[in-house]
Image: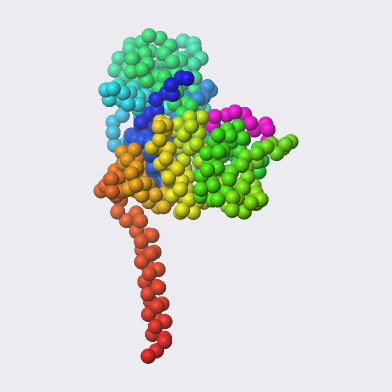
Amino acid sequence: MEKPAQLPDALIVGGYRGYADEQRLELRPLTVLFGRNNSGKSALVRALPLLSASIRGTGAQVLDMAGPVVRGASFDEMTSRGLERSDELEIRDMYLGLRWPCEVGEVGIDVSFHWPDRKLVAVSGIRSASGPWWRHRLQRGPATPGIVGFESREDPSRAFDLKLAGLSFEAADDAVPRELVTARPLWNAFGGQVQWLSASRRPGDRRAEYAELTGSPLLEHDGRNVIAFLAERPSLTKAISSWYEQHLGARLVVSEQSPIGYDARLEYTSRPGQVVNLLDTGEGNVQVLSVLAALSGAADGSGPPIVVLEEPESHLHPHLQMALAERIAKLVTGDVDARIVLETHSEHLLLAVQKLVLEGLDPKSIALYWVEQLADGRTIAERVEIREDGTFDEKWPPGVFDDTLQLARRIMQLQLERSDFARAGEGP
C-alpha cells in the first residue's frame, strides 16, 4: 500500500482578503480559529480548500474561482487592495502557500496571482520557503499551452519553465530550483488532502437517488451528498451511528429503499419500533451528520486527512458540542495523521477544548488563534498558547467572555432583588 503523502504544518497567505500582511496559520492536529462575527475566520480557513481545489484543477484559470469557496467573488474582491502593507514585498499580488517540516527547517512553496486581462486569474510569481520570488516571464513568441516561464527579478537571464495543470506543476526543464523540485510532490498531493464543510450542511433531499452514488471521495461543502456518500461506505455509517447511539439514544441507519435509492433514518433504542427519517428530527442531528462523516473518513483513511469545518457546533445543544469536541479529540490523539481545522465563535466549544486539555489532551497538539479585524480594515490571526491547566496566555484578549458573565451576574442580582421584595411583602 502506498504511503500517504506528508501533511503540511502551515498555511501562508498574503494580500488575501483582509490579510494584507503575510499571515502564517500553523496546522496542528487541532487548529481552532476563534473570534467574533465578521472577523475574518472563514476567509482564512477557506484558503485551504481554495488552494486544494485549485491544485486539483486542470483549467486555464489557475485559481478555482468557479467553486463554492469564493462565493462568486471576483479576483479584486479576493485581494486586499486598498490596504497598505507593512512589509516591502517583491511581489505585491495575492499569494497562497504551504509549509512542510523537514530534517533541517522546512520546505514550502508560495504562488502569487494577478488578473492581467480582467478575465482569467494567472500566476504572477513563485518562490520556495527559503528563496526569493521568481516572477512570471512574458512569452517571447508563440505560447505553449500549460507552460509558464519564470525569471529572476535581479537577473532575467536566470529562468526556468513549469508545466501547470491548475496549480499542480512539474518541471519543464532542468533549470528549476532544487527547492521547488523537492516540494513539488508534497504540493501536488495537497490537491486531494482537504475536506471542507461550510456552516450550512444538510442532505440535498430526503433520499439519495442511485445516480448520486458516484464514488466521490469528497463530501460537497454543504453536505448535500452525505446520504449517497455513506451508502457507499457502510463502515463510516457504523462509526457515526455509535456517536448517535451514545449521545442521542438512536441508531443511524442508511438503507436502500428500492426502487427509489437510499435514505437515512434514526432508530430510537429506547422506543422500539420508532424509526424517523433523519430530516424529520432536530436540525442539530442533521447538521452534524456531515461533520461526523468527514471526521470518520479522516479517522479510517478513506477520506481526506485535513478536515476544515466552519461552525461545526451549528444547532447543537451545549452538551452535544462537548460530545463533538470529544470526538475530535479522539481523532487527533489517535494513530492517524490528520489535521482538524475549525472556525467558531462558540464559547461552549472553546470551553470544551479547555476541559479536554485538563483531561490530558496535549496543548502542543492545538493551535488556537484569536482572529480580529483592526480599525484600518486589516485582519490578523494572533496565536494564543494554551497552558496545561487549560488557561490561555496573555495574548488572549481580555473580556471575551464578559457578556456571559455579566448576564449571569445580572440574573443573580434580579433573583436576589425579587427574593428581597417577596420577603418584604410578607410583613412581620
- Residue positioned most to the bottom: 428
- Residue positioned most to the right: 259
Query: Camera-side residue: 273 or 422?
Result: 273
Query: Camera-side residue: 334 or 131?
Result: 334
Image position, residue 208 (x, y; %): 65, 37
Image position, residue 114 (x, y; %): 43, 27
Image position, residue 162 (x, y; %): 42, 15
Start-end of magenta stretch:
209-219
106 magenta-colored? no
User: Quarter of the image holding residue 44?
Assistant: top left
Q: What residue sits 51% from the left and 50% below the top?
A: 247
Q: What residue sits 36% from the left and 61% below the top?
A: 405
Query: Camera-side residue: 1 or 285?
Result: 1
Q: What residue sits 40% from the left and 78% below the top?
A: 419
Residue 75 visible in the displayed image = no
Residue 143 visible in the displayed image = yes
- Residue positioned most to the top: 174
Image position, residue 335 (x, y; %): 40, 32
Is 312 placed above or below 302 here? Answer: below
Is 239 placed above or below 60 here? Answer: below
Answer with left or right where residue 407 lies relative to residue 201: left
216 magenta-colored? yes
> Count of labels shown?
0
Q: Look at the magenta stretch and give its main secondary structure.
A: loop
Is 229 placed above or below 122 here? Answer: below
Which quadrant: the C terminus? bottom left
